[in-house]
Amino acid sequence: MEPLSIEQWSQLMSMTGINEDKVTYPTFLNNPIDSTLIFVYRQGNAHRGTVYFKKYDAKNEEWIDYPNPIITGEQDSPTICPYWNHPVFDESGQLHLSFVWRKRPVNGKINNVGMHYIRSSDNGMTWYNCAGDSLFLPIIPESPTEIWSIPQLSNLINQTSMAIDANSNPHIVYYSNDTGQIPQYQHLWFDGNTWKNSTISLRKIPFNLEGKGTLQIPMSRPEVIVDKNDVVYMILRADVSHDKLMVISFLPLDYSPENAKKEILCPIPVGYAEPLIDRMRWQNDNTLTILVQFNHQPQTDKVLDYHTSPVFLGDWVFKP
């Protein structure tokens, strides 16, 4: 199929019909080595969720279910569920996946705990933890996958981002409380021997992740990308950027926040928007493409009376 050639699109194609009646968080991944197309999704809800994989058989033009679910909280408790950060393939075709566990809310507060990490060299059929130990599937809360301890009720945000450097080491960005119980952006990365974590922001105003539906949160989920020189770029929108899209760049090898460079990407505030980036564009030509639109984000799904806002695509190229 030629890129951008709509005439070559196929007709609508169903998948397998198995574990597809309560699908959320669909994600498509493409292995850069063998071009395997993988579909990652959650079956269930926030209290009873399981991560499943399917892959596309290009020869027979059909989807195939993996024999086992990948991660599940159902065997442990009906009130614990995995939430993954964006999975990513490295240049060797190894698949990296990080995630948190969500427990039962406490007094209405969202209760995500811990940061976990697994990897696979066969498109997600078998998985290993950071120590290289083989994991039984499905992975459950008792599985040895935790890489960074984050206690409950720490305002740990779920579903953030991960990227891989030239040495296939993962970099995870997220936010959670500092020692003063104020949510701060964090950078967690593996240097080849140990996991290291840095607090990035210096926010002064506390808040709690609580309530159902959409929330008017003063800081967005962060995105992360890594260039060919292993410079890490965290993209965000927050009160510390006056609700404008910002990029913070960190230099190897220590990725010190003190030496980080901050740059506003767009001079226009975007409300409660979260950065949406084109990962394939970055992978192919080191151009960061972001969808930019002002977001009103109604609190707890309340209906707002607001006007629509235009949508832009912005491209940024960072100099070495």
Image (cartoon, grey):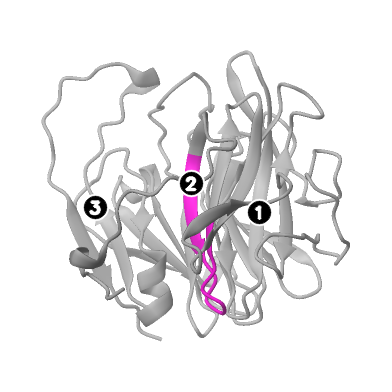
x%, y% of residue 72?
72, 37
To which quarter of the image does residue 79 belong?
top right
Q: Distance between the residues labelled 1 and 2?
A: 26 Å
Q: Residue at 52% across / 29% down in the picture?
A: 22
**Per the image, is 70 magenta?**
no
Is residue 126 or residue 224 the one in the foreground? 126
Q: Residue at 48% across / 67% down in the picture?
A: 58
Dot 1 corresponds to which residue? 98
In the rendered image, the vertical position of residue 168 relative to residue 117, given as above or below:
below
Dot 3 corresponds to which residue? 292
Q: Closer to the camera: disc 3 or disc 2?
A: 2
Residue 15 — which label?
2
x%, y% of residue 52?
63, 45
x%, y% of residue 173?
56, 55
- N-term-proximal mark, 1 vs 3: 1
Is residue 249 or residue 273 the one in the foreground? 273
